[in-house]
Each structure stands twice: as C-alpha cells, then as structure tokens.
Amino acid sequence: MIDIDYGFVRIRLKEVMQKQNVSINKLAFRSEMQRTQLKAYIAGDIQRIDLNVIARLCHALECDICDLLEYMPPSK
C-alpha cells in the first residue's frame, strides 16, 4: 500500500489564547474543561478532534472554527 501525504490539520489554540490574552485557567473555567485536556489541545498532542470540545472552545473564546483549525497541505 502506498503511503499518501494528505497534509494535516493544525490546532491554533495557543495562538488564539495569546492573541486574546487568555490563560489556561481562565479558558478551563469558561469552557468547563480540564486543564490537562486543554494542554493536550494546546500542544497538538491529540489524535482525534472532538467536535464538542471545538464547539466549547469556539464559544468560550468567541471565535470561529477556522480560527482554531488550519489545514496544512502536503509539501511537494
């Protein structure tokens, strides 16, 4: 089987938090999420994106989904 490079999706949570000057503690409170789960999203250490988590983050940060996720095409 040929391994095809489709690119990847990058989570821009850290950048959005920095731009809005929101700490992880404040975001955890606003989104009603655990800091450990937020840390995994900030570091990009997740395998599957949970749409409920993305919805919570968009609501808490008052942003759009395209502010949090970015498609990175494959390098050719």
Image: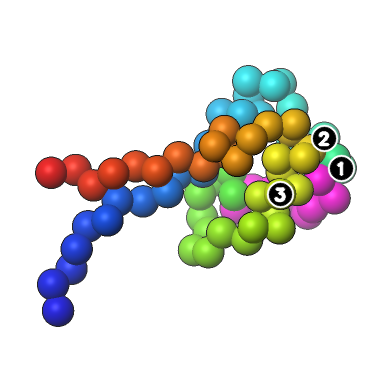
Q: Earlier in the sequence, mark 1 or mark 3?
A: 1
Q: Hey, what amino acid is under mark 2?
A: Lys
Q: Secondary structure at mark 1?
A: helix
Q: CA distance from mark 1 to mark 2?
A: 5 Å
Q: Which mark is residue 29?
A: 1
Disc 3 and disc 2: Cα gap in Å? 17 Å
**Can you tell which of label 1 and label 3 is closer to the viewer?**
3
Give x and y (percent) for residue 37: 68, 55
Q: Mark 3, residues whose alpha carbon is within 10 Å: few (<14), some, or many (≥20)?
A: some
Residue 76, quarter of picture? top left
Q: Determine which residue is flagged by label 2.
A: 26
Residue 13 sits above or below residue 40 on the image: above
Instruction: Give the residue drawn at x 23%, y 47%.
Output: 74
Across and down, in percent, residue 10 comes to 45, 44
Position of 37 relative to 73 (above/below): below
The answer to whether residue 14 is seen in the rendering is no
Instruction: For residue 32, say whether it is visible.
Output: yes
The tag on residue 21 is none
Cα separation between marks 1 and 3: 15 Å
Q: Residue flagged by tag 3: what amino acid is it? A: Ala
Magenta highlight range: 31-40
Residue in the image at 63% along x and 20% along y = 19
Could you tell me if the residues under marks 1 and 2 are in contact, i.e. CB atoms within 8 Å? yes
Helix, strand or loop at disc 3? helix
The residue carrying mark 3 is: 55
Q: Is residue 60 left or right of residue 75?
A: right
Residue 6 image point, x, y percent: 27, 56
Q: Nearer the viewer, residue 50 or 13?
A: 50
